[in-house]
Amino acid sequence: MKNVLVLFFLLLLASCTTKKASSRLSQEFLKGKRLAELTGKKLNEVSGLASSINNPGLLWAHNDSGNDAEIYLIDQKLDIKQTYILHDIKNRDWEDIAVGPGPDSTKNYIYIAEIGDNDASSQLKYIYRFEEPILDSTGEKITVTTFDTITFQLSGSRKDTEALLIDPQNKDLYIISKREEPVHIYQLKYPYAIDDTLTAVQAGSLPLTQIVAGNISADGTEILMKNYNHIYYWKNASDKPVLELLKEIPQEIPYEAEPQGESITWAIDKSGFYTISEKNKEKKSYLYFYQRR
């Protein structure tokens, strides 16, 4: 009889846990819609995606380690409209990209995150920042020669990181670790010097793992993060600072499984968000859009 009661208790506990987890599912977004299949040879290892502000309706994308030091301005059919090359820079392991405010309040900036480190062997990480370009009608490749290099290390031990977020309210940068549980949040407070090696200070943690991308909405009121199996969503209903908001349990948005999805970005108008995966020989990869209901 005792064993029966124990079994009943465990089943009841499991049932309660299931209900609690399911109650955190967000109903704010429709199922992910396939906008285009990834077939081009250039976008073979997409690890960063960001909505353009200066070029409405277009997206910025880049590949990760071992590829050219290039970013691509693409449309929603995954056609490359223009290529921008960072002069004299190597793509050691670019893992994320963001568009947001910068030193000049009248301009928008691109932030490219050279922050990947699978083997946790590199002391220094880099973020390349430059004014967001406007599409050149010629469509020719353009070399970017003027950009800032934000050089930093993580406080504590070396770690692999793949997610970069910029707070549009105060320009602080957040870097999220990947290969641990919980993952940790590292912060670079604005203004960040470009003539010194900075330390990104550990500022919190999340009871998650394998975080590969993140994005804060252009108005600062919503946050997305993802790993290979889940999309996490925070809604800032009471105007909390980013670190306070991230202490809350996120909602989960039902995820259209991708072969190796490492990118996520809000649409600038917050009508929804996009995801995309690296190309895979065995499974097709798509640009998805999750429309807000």
Image (tube, helix red, strand yellow):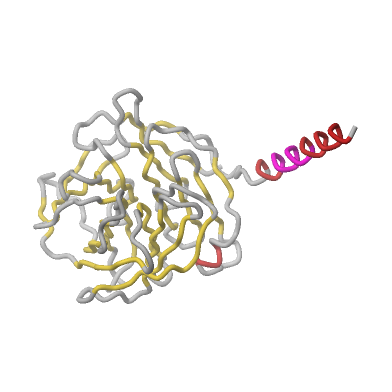
- Tell how many labels: 0
Q: Is residue 200 above or below residue 134?
A: below
Residue 205 left/right relative to 286: right
Which x, y percent locates residue 130?
Answer: 21, 63
Q: Main secondary structure of the magenta part?
A: helix
Depth check: 243 or 122 in front?
122
Q: What segment is highlighted magenta in the picture?
A: 12-19
Q: Residue at x 27, y 59 (%)?
A: 110
Give the residue at x 56% y 56%. Answer: 235
Residue placed furthest toward the right:
1
Q: Is residue 96 left or right of residue 18?
A: left
Q: Residue at x 40, y 43 (%)?
A: 274
Any magenta on residue 76? no
* Residue 39 image-quadrant placement: top left
Q: For this rendering, which residue is in front, 100 or 280?
A: 280
91 w.r.t. 4: above or below: below
Task: Please state, as top left, top right, bottom left or bottom right, where the N terminus lies in the image.
Answer: top right
Coordinates of residue 108 in the picture (x, y in percent)? 29, 63
The answer to whether residue 266 is seen in the rendering is no
Q: Residue at x 47, y 55 (%)?
A: 183
Classify residue 285 by image quadrant. Answer: top left
200 w.r.t. 178: above or below: below
The residue furthest top is 282
